[in-house]
Image (cartoon, rainbow, N blue to C red):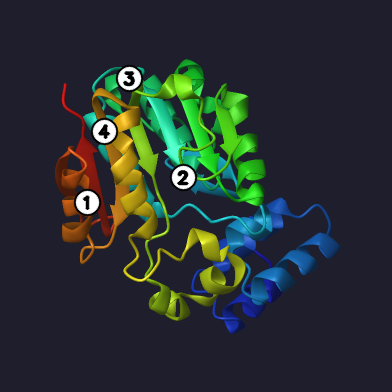
Amino acid sequence: MEDPAIVARLRAAGCVFAEEEARLLAAAARTRDDLEAMAGLREKGLPIEQVIGWAWFCGLRIFVDAGVFVPRRRSEFLVETAVRLAAEASPVIVDLCCGTGALGVAVAARLADGARGAAGPRGAAPHAAGPHAAGLHAADVDPAAVGCARRNVEPAGGRVYQGDLFGPLPAALRGRVGILICNAPYVPTEDIGMLPPEARDYEPRIALDGGPDGLAVLRRVAAEAPRWLAPGGVLLVETSDSQAPLMTRAVAAAGLEARVHGCEEYESTVVTGAAPR
């Protein structure tokens, strides 16, 4: 049960879901002092997921460390799209700009559950991805993200690498990747100041800033993706509606079959590029 005093503090700080967040804080705190300290961090604007150390994503409990990009619910649509387009039951999965590793872990978990596409039981541990996670590889340039991703990906049997995009991946993966996820930053530089404070102030700039039009990193990924994709393999990236035409052109220019997928429920747009079979 939530503490009325904590609820009042969170509501005064502008937390829309003050009651729910107060319950989460109470469940995560070991002592009253812990609860007071955690409530103070949330009052300052630290994302609730970073305060309590985890987030729900696709029915999985994903570790989230301070200073690491928090997985968004809208990205669950990218996971659903990846599972739907997977050309085989247990493809090699690569998650670039992985942050916590949530997207790759979730895709592996869904595929392990088979054609049902079930998310698994609410509250399942991050390593619920099962046997297919052995084909899961994740990479990020940010050391903090890499450390966090290892807590989510490696218990499932996957591997995490530190470096820029494809750079740290084993050369043996070239031409073998069935699902290539890149949830790279796509916010245009001039729009960073308009982001909510909890993102702008507490998530790394490198995970938000996509350059002048937001697509600087994603264009690099699209250009190199064909070298890594297996026949019929698919690249999936998240963009805004307005960026989708530009991203589609970049994907097509790389020789991939480009498509735009949108979902009003998730308020999400995903651009895919399929390699020739």
Q: Which is nearer the N-term, disc 3 or disc 4?
A: 3
Q: Amino acid at mark 2?
A: Phe
Q: Residues within 10 Å of mark 1 (few under 14, many from 20)?
A: many
The answer to whether mark 3 and mark 2 are in CB contact below 8 A is: no
Whether residue 149 is situated above or below residue 132 in the rendered picture: below
Q: Which is nearer the N-term, disc 1 or disc 3?
A: 3
Front position in the image: 177 or 71: 177
CA separation in Å, label 3 and label 4: 18 Å
| Place of residue 22 in the rendered image (x, y in percent of width and height, measured from the top left) | 63, 64
SS at circle 4: strand
Name the residue: 35% across, 20% down: 176
Task: Please give the label number shown on residue 234.
Answer: 4
Q: Is residue 125 visible?
A: no
SS at circle 1: helix
**Number of marks in picture:** 4
Name the residue: 37% across, 61% down: 186
Name the residue: 50% across, 47% down: 56
Dot in front, 1 or 2: 1
Task: Please give the label number shown on residue 217.
Answer: none
Whether residue 136 is situated above or below residue 268 in the rendered picture: above
State the residue position of label 2: 57
The answer to whether mark 1 and mark 4 are in CB contact below 8 A is: no
Q: Quadrant of residue 40?
A: bottom right
The answer to whether mark 3 and mark 4 are in CB contact below 8 A is: no
CA separation in Å, label 3 and label 2: 18 Å
State the residue position of label 3: 114
Front position in the image: 219 or 68: 219
Whether residue 42 is situated above or below residue 64 in the rendered picture: below
| Place of residue 172 in the rendered image (x, y in percent of width and height, measured from the top left) | 46, 19
Q: Amino acid at mark 4?
A: Val
